[in-house]
Image (cartoon, rainbow, N blue to C red):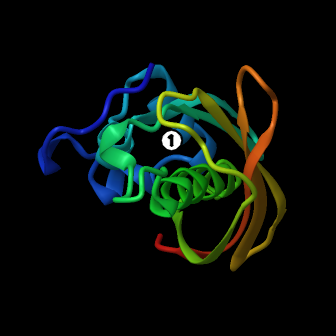
Amino acid sequence: MPYAAQSPADLLPPEKIISMSGLAFMQGILRGEIAGAPIAETLNFDLHEVEEGRVRFSGVPTFAAMNPSGAVHGGWYGALLDSALGCAVMTMVPKGSVYTTLEYKVNITRAIRPGTVVDCVAVVDHVGRSTGVAHADIRGREDGKVYATGSTTCIIMKVA
């Protein structure tokens, strides 16, 4: 299971990130050799599968992810989807390049109850020289229901 960075010093320096392909970078996170994003630990989700053009995250919203009305905050759905979507695109980014989210869209289809285990699978639709496009859904592990869907467009930037 990946580990989350505990301080900025735990994060891989940019020059090391661009020295490998996006797929190698993501596989390093999955194997626990490279620190994952601290926000994943904060929001209680993590990376479970990586392959070219596809990733799977799993998570469980806790009380800390609730809004005052007692529902899981939409930001939790968004953070999980943005993480999975961007990481799926990253698996297709060549050595010497990085990506960042240009835009993403979230469609919440039903409420997730705190404590529900969900899986978020993201799949790349297209990656070119300057953009990547992907889609994902959040499904309950036990019930298989779709709780949210999302899509992204990422910009790919050649650094080296």
Q: Disc 1 residue type?
A: Phe
Q: Quadrant of residue 127?
A: bottom right
Give residue 143's position: percent from left, percent from top: 78, 25
Secondary element at image label 1: helix
Q: Is residue 27 left or right of residue 1?
A: right
Q: Is residue 36 left or right of residue 120?
A: left
Q: Nearer the viewer, residue 115 or 48?
A: 115
On screen, 136 above or below 150? above
Q: State the residue at coordinates (34%, 59%).
A: 68
Give residue 96's position: percent from left, percent from top: 52, 62
Give residue 6's position: percent from left, percent from top: 16, 38
Give residue 23's position: percent from left, percent from top: 62, 42
Q: Quadrant of residue 141?
A: top right
Near mark 1 (Cα within 10 A), the count class, few <14, some 14-19 or many ≥20, is many
Q: Is residue 141 left or right of residue 67?
A: right
Q: For the N terminus, which image quadrant?
A: top left
In the rendered image, the residue lying farthest to the right is 125
Q: In this orientation, does residue 146 appear?
A: yes
Q: State the residue at coordinates (39%, 42%).
A: 40
Q: State the residue at coordinates (56%, 29%).
A: 116
Mark 1, residue position: 25
On screen, 71 above or below 57? below
On screen, 52 above or below 144? below
Q: Quadrant of residue 152?
A: bottom right
